[in-house]
Amino acid sequence: MSHEVEILLALFVVFVSAQIGAEIAQRLKMPGVVGEIAAGCLIGPSVLNLIHIDAPLEVLAEIGAVLLLFSVGLETRLDDLKKVGRVAAAVGILGVAVPFVLGGLWAGTIGLATPKALFVGVAFVATSAGITARVLQELGVLDRLESRVIMGAAVIDDILAMLLLGVVTAMQGGGGIDISNLMLVLLQAVGFVVLIALAGTRIMRHSSDLLEAPINPRSPLTLSLALCLGLAAAAAYLGLAAIIGAFLAGMAVAETRQRHTLERQLKPIEALLVPFFFVVTGANVKLAELASVEALTTLLVITGLAIVSKLVACGIGAWSMGLRSALIVGVGMVPRGEVGIIIASLGKQAGVITEGMYAAIIAMSLLTSVVAPPALTALFRLKCDTESAPQ
Amino acid sequence: MSHEVEILLALFVVFVSAQIGAEIAQRLKMPGVVGEIAAGCLIGPSVLNLIHIDAPLEVLAEIGAVLLLFSVGLETRLDDLKKVGRVAAAVGILGVAVPFVLGGLWAGTIGLATPKALFVGVAFVATSAGITARVLQELGVLDRLESRVIMGAAVIDDILAMLLLGVVTAMQGGGGIDISNLMLVLLQAVGFVVLIALAGTRIMRHSSDLLEAPINPRSPLTLSLALCLGLAAAAAYLGLAAIIGAFLAGMAVAETRQRHTLERQLKPIEALLVPFFFVVTGANVKLAELASVEALTTLLVITGLAIVSKLVACGIGAWSMGLRSALIVGVGMVPRGEVGIIIASLGKQAGVITEGMYAAIIAMSLLTSVVAPPALTALFRLKCDTESAPQ
């Protein structure tokens, strides 16, 4: 009975502290996710020690992450990628390549072996489509050209980052780079992603009816959730991150007629479960690991590198749109948010990333997510003023 | 990584088998819940051994049960209890007292000590408001007088059963009946239930605005979920069942203006999480424990006792409505469904109920839930034919 009380109390404390943290963050004009992670830090073992992270909370956090990425996938359509076209592709590819190389090189210079250094590089790559989209939505500029480029690039970025993550994760097993194994892993990862992203979306596009009776007499929601859990498990089974599978499942379901209904139905599920992911993430940060001059220096270097590499690479990718638009796109790509955190968590679970590095990457993901929204807001306002002046 | 695959695969298997089981059950004109439990039996250790029940699955099942009872509470209004009035109260009270006494006496005759025998008695008491409501809804007769009496009585029944459960659970600790302790427990249970049911609903009735900004800037859903988790934890802390707290939280929130929105938002959450409760329940049944003549005899006796005691007691309670209506009400109160199963699970967790008795009670809850819906359907059709004949 005492154990039941403990679990229920932990669920209550995690959920409520997430709400309070998100609320405070949003009042400070920051994304709610920043507050949820901070709340996790606060109630976790590092500070108040109100909860300890056990298997059930870890699984709830994993389900939260899977559903979050499913939902991000659900807002992502193959056609959107095609429409924003060349610029988004340039931004997305440069935005992955430059931070990955610079991050990996930096990790190499501080003495990490190649596979581990590459893993750290991947943590620099991720762009949080969720945070960026939420900020753009709050600003009411989702229909602007820059926003569409950002969203398209963020999607390409996400896919490339996940692909890289899959490749780099699988590489951790071997002592060095086994080319034939790497090729197999790459083939497997690319095959899975391409199969689901192209064939899956194509199949779903023509099977909205399949989601309804009589072939699927359960609701479209239950079939979609089953697809999400199934592809998450399949991705994990293939050695990819589970969230890749969930994201692809979302992208496939995004092609159906029922996508808006499903988006609406997913909201309450996310409201309940996603906070567990961010709070557990925050609770896993060992603040003590950041409490030295050396660690703080590392944090500042990582954060600076993360911001500059993304800003410059994406800015160059969007250069054809003009300086200010390029700046907006660059800043919009800066937040690492949940994707960076998921990668860091995976790295820590796999024993690839040390406690100190984990704390630094989480803090970096936090800082980039905190810095970008106000900058983005300022740039959009500045641009609007300049644009409306000549009228 | 392998552990992650295992967990995700278990989630997928549980969720999908629940859907398939529910679908098959519904095609056989049985409540979906019967199929979900049967699916759990099938994939559990007893038969296919596809999943084993560990802490994360147990917690997911508990969250599922808590949310289910929250949702049942959300469909329950104090005013409904008052409107159907005297008849519903008579049906509810007799429907608790008679099965409790007969069940407890029977458990005593097979040699159980008083506190354990009383616990078994409680498992006879529960009426599944969920199953009954779903059947009445499918028949399209929710507005009929019998239906309103059934629902009102089911609610009274639920509250009395939960109260009994709390009292009987707390009694398991002591070696005998400690009157002063019993009074304390009773006072605590009644105090908690009355406080939340009366004061809580009254407060919520006048605080729909509280669910909106600016006092609660998060959504009404998040505040309601927090209330649900909080009262579930509080109930468990007081030694009551967590689901009592969740049910009362639902009843309190049912008094707000946002109840219909919340009911709609809870549906997707239930669709994801409630199946875990029923499948885990089924997976926990040790079929081997039922594989003897003695065990099967026990099962038949329990099921017969459960049906007859409820039918006669509730029929007498509704006698003033005429024979056929009294029969409808009696049959409508027969399904034990999830409430009986929750009580049996709690009894097993607390070590009060043996594996054999647990398997028998689950099977009884299943059988009563399977038997009642067709009988109810037949009685309603019969009554309609007779009524329309003289016109």
Image (cartoon, coloured by chain):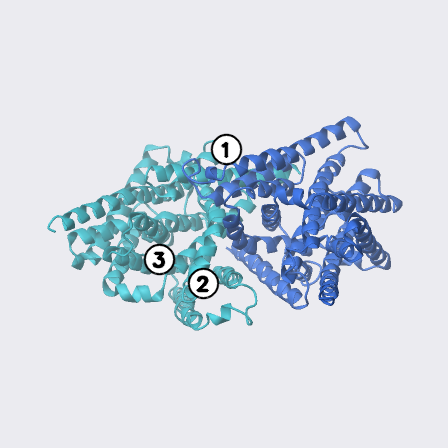
Chain colours: A blue, B cyan
What label does residue B249 carry, if any? 2
Work out whether A378 lies above or below A352. below
Work out whether A177 lies above or below B53. above
Name the residue type under label 2: Ala
> Camera-side residue: A50 or B328?
B328
Q: Is residue B268 visible?
A: yes
Residue B24 in the image: state x and y as whole percent.
38, 36
Q: Chain of mark 1?
A: B
Q: Chain of mark 3?
A: B
Residue B171 in the image: state x and y as whole percent.
41, 58
Looking at the rendered structure, the secondary structure element under dot 2 is helix
Question: How far apart are the alpha carbons under marks 2 and 1?
Answer: 37 Å
Q: Chain of mark 2?
A: B
Q: Are marks 3 and 2 on the same chain?
A: yes
Question: How far apart are the alpha carbons under marks 3 and 2?
Answer: 14 Å
Give the class, few, some or many, for how many residues have Cα within 10 Å of label 2's Cα (few <14, many ≥20). Answer: many
What label does residue B158 carry, if any? 3
Residue occupying image coordinates x 54% and y 50%? A263
Residue A225 in the image: state x and y as whole percent.
52, 43
Q: Is residue B221 left or right of residue B149?
A: right
Give the class, few, some or many, for how many residues have Cα within 10 Å of label 3's Cα (few <14, many ≥20). Answer: many
Question: How far apart are the alpha carbons under marks 3 and 1?
Answer: 34 Å
Q: Are marks 3 and 2 in contact (CB under 8 Å)?
A: no
Q: Is residue B284 left or right of residue A112?
A: left
